[in-house]
Image (cartoon, rainbow, N blue to C red):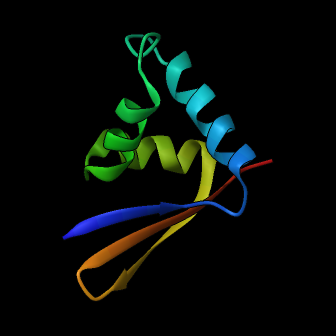
Amino acid sequence: MSITISSPNMEDTETLYGKYIEIPGNEGASFDDFYEFLSVESAGRQLFLEEYCTYEFVEARNTVVLKFSVKV
């Protein structure tokens, strides 16, 4: 099953990527690395999303959509 990542605006995605590269060990991570991190189910991903976002996963046929917005 594939995953699609969705945000109400590009600014939220850029903000979340900025938070991701602030984590020790991720300083040199590319946007592709960030996308892969969000695409693969893990405890780290769940903790990251819970810390910085409101989010939901929506299933649509063979795709799961991760919809998020950055917490204010």
Locate residue 72 relative to residue 5 in the image: left or right: right
Q: Specify the quadrant of the image occupied by residue 32.
A: top left
Q: Position of residue 40 (x, y in %)?
A: 25, 49
Residue for point 46% across, 31% down: 31
| Residue shown at 31% from the left, 41% from the top | 36
Q: Residue at x 74, y 44 (%)?
A: 11
Q: Indicate the position of residue 39 as horizontal and vertical percent values.
A: 32, 51
Q: How many marks?
A: 0
Q: Quadrant of residue 47?
A: top left
Residue ranking furthest to the bottom: 61
**Residue 29: image location, x then y, percent:** 41, 19
Specify the quadrant that holds the N terminus.
bottom left
Q: Nearer the viewer, residue 7 or 19?
A: 7
Farthest residue to the right: give it: 72
The image position of residue 14, as x and y in percent, is 65, 37
Relative depth, front residue between 13 and 53: 13
Q: Is residue 20 left or right of residue 32?
A: right
State left or right for residue 13 relative to residue 26.
right
- Residue at 32% from the left image edge and 64% from the top image edge: 3
- Residue 65 appears in which quarter of the rendering? bottom left
Depth check, front residue: 3 or 71: 3
